[in-house]
Image: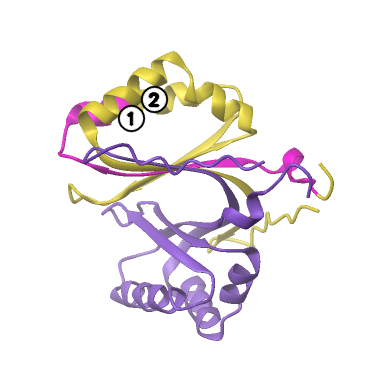
Chain colours: A purple, B yellow
């Protein structure tokens, strides 16, 4: 693809934002189980998650993947399909899922010399 | 760009993950001010944010933009530059910033009929 070199050295982010209906310990257990399972899948690169403490607070979970095929394979994993169905039946009031290709990546820490992992494809 | 139709109908996500050093009300005030300013910029499409209650909890903020130029313009906005500098001096222990092009977007709600805004470019 002319003008793009991103497919080789970039990665993909699955951005999952959600609101829960009500507190349910079963949700946390399932989320932990799914993270453990996802991290064993081919192409899994990492995971970040944050949710405020209020019941209706927005939660954001982002998983990072090597390529689109890895994302599709995880999406169709049989145990993950069951979890997705339970999520719609029991836990989520709302969710939105975006798949995005990471083009730039820049890291900074106050502890030491600047970490600059920025890369501009092309 | 051959093989790509995403630039017209997709958008870009700026994924900002961070850890704070210590609680500081100045941080929240500045974050609010910057969100208000960002939302007035050309190409701004939306914003999502989540942070757990612990001091060292990961925070995730995602802003959505029409195109790369809008992101660059906001990155270089003079008031935003001052805020970025203050962030490094006072508030952040760590941050990571990724820019990603959204390729798929799927929405679901338990309230009504399925909302499916999925679009697959190309």
Residue beneath disc 2: B34
Q: Quadrant of the N terminus of chain B?
A: top right
- Residue A26 x %, y %: 33, 77
- Are the residues at dot 1 and dot 2 in contact (C-beta closer than 8 Å)? yes
- Residue A31 x %, y %: 38, 72
| Vertical position of residue A108 compared to residue B116: above or below | above
Check residue A95 for magenta coloring: no
- Which chain is indicated by disc 2? B
Check residue B15 for magenta coloring: yes
Q: Which residues are magenta?
A: B4-30
Quick one: SS at disc 1?
helix
Quick one: SS at disc 2?
helix
Q: Residue furthest front?
A: A113
Is B109 or B1 nearer to us in this picture? Answer: B1
> Label 1 to label 2, Cα distance in Å?
5 Å
Q: Residue at x 18, y 40 (%)?
A: B21
| Vertical position of residue A42 compared to residue B17: above or below | below
């Amino acid at each position: 693809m002319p003008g793009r070199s991103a497919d080789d050295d970039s990665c993909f982010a699955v951005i999952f934002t959600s609101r829960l209906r009500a507190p349910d310990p079963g949700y946390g257990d399932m989320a932990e189980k799914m993270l453990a399972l996802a991290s064993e899948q081919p192409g899994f690169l990492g995971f970040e998650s944050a949710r405020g403490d209020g019941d209706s607070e927005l939660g954001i979970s982002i998983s990072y993947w090597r390529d689109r095929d890895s994302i599709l394979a995880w999406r169709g994993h049989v145990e993950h399909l069951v979890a997705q169905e339970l999520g719609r039946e029991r836990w989520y009031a709302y969710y939105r899922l975006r798949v995005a290709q990471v083009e730039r990546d820049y890291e900074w820490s106050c502890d030491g010399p600047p970490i600059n992992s920025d890369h501009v494809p092309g």
